[in-house]
Image (tube, rainbow, N blue to C red):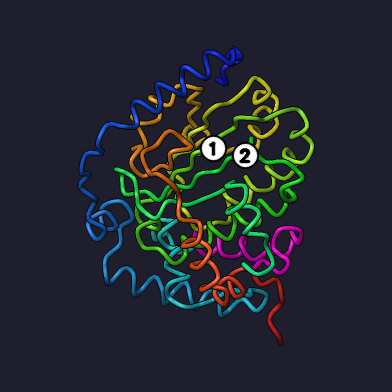
Amino acid sequence: MVENRARSPSATETAAATMREAAKAPAQPRPQPNLEETARLELGETPETKKKSLQYLRRLIEGTSSLNVPTDDDFLVSFLRARKYRVQEAFETVKKFSQMRQDLPEFFEDLTPAKVPIKAICHENELVMVSPQPDAFGRSVALLRLGAWKPSMCSFTDLIRASLLLAGRSALDDVTQINGAAGIVDLKGLNFYHMVPLTSSLIKLVQFTQDCVPMRIKALYIVNHPPVTEFLFSAVKPFLKSKLLARIHFIGHDASKLWDMCPRDITPAEFGGTRERFDYDRQDVFLRSRAEFFERLYSRRRPEK
């Protein structure tokens, strides 16, 4: 359940001070999971299974004239891993991915780094970021300051478009494909004026993320959520599948609860972590260097007959 009790400013300041003190503790070294072993145990991936599944999935896609998706190994493996090498399920996800690009032009039309205000979203307002290091479980960690968003910064549609570009990185990253991803959503500042633009767009994003994105979402941690969160969550909840719903954790204002699940040494200081500042320049360079990939990944053009 979402906490309904509002925090007074003094209590919030006290919690923030406690968070900063806790963040001073030195990070402990973390053994990283063995990727090959994790892929075998959790996904059923072996060299032979991977080879045969790729061949089968590629035949299914090439035999469907309406599909316009990349067919290189890296792209297809991301869908196979997301569905634990159940090839038919992976194929259905590819079809949904292709169809959703057509159904949501507001998100996918010209979705490339050059067409999204990355500077305003990331550099100037620090609304979304992906840690370059995995957490203790080997997961990729994304941070979204949803409550800090204001229409004067960028449109909410562009915030989602930027998030989709960063999510598209998973198709390039073996670590994320195998170990999955976790998200930290900071709702500090969320107010009623957020409700109209957020609600309908978040419902669409939830449906796309659950059904179409080749990513294994292992956990979502909601922090600093005010009472108004109850209204937003009640609107989105009916569209959440039971598996994802069970992986949503409301942390409240006590960040120490978060560090039991997501180490603070990979989290920027503004979220109570020990990483001094996130390298937005590196993130921007990476996205722009993969512009051609994103054009192929999110293209809405139908294949020529």
Q: Quadrant of the C terminus?
A: bottom right
Dot 1 corresponds to which residue?
185
Dot 2 corresponds to which residue?
146
Q: Tag 1's secondary structure?
A: strand
Type of amino acid under label 1: Val
Instruction: Work out whether residue 212 or residue 205 is closer to the camera in this orientation and state it.
Output: 205
The magenta region covers: 89-112
- Whether residue 148 sits left or right of residue 283 in the image: it is right
Q: Tag 2's secondary structure?
A: helix
Query: Where residue 267 appears, x then y in whole percent?
Result: 40, 42
The answer to if 110 sits in the magenta stretch is yes
The answer to if 45 sits in the magenta stretch is no
Whether 196 is drawn above or below 230: the answer is below
Quadrant in which residue 5 is drawn:
top right
Query: Where residue 232 appears, x then y in whole percent?
Result: 68, 30
Whether 21 is drawn above or below 160: the answer is above
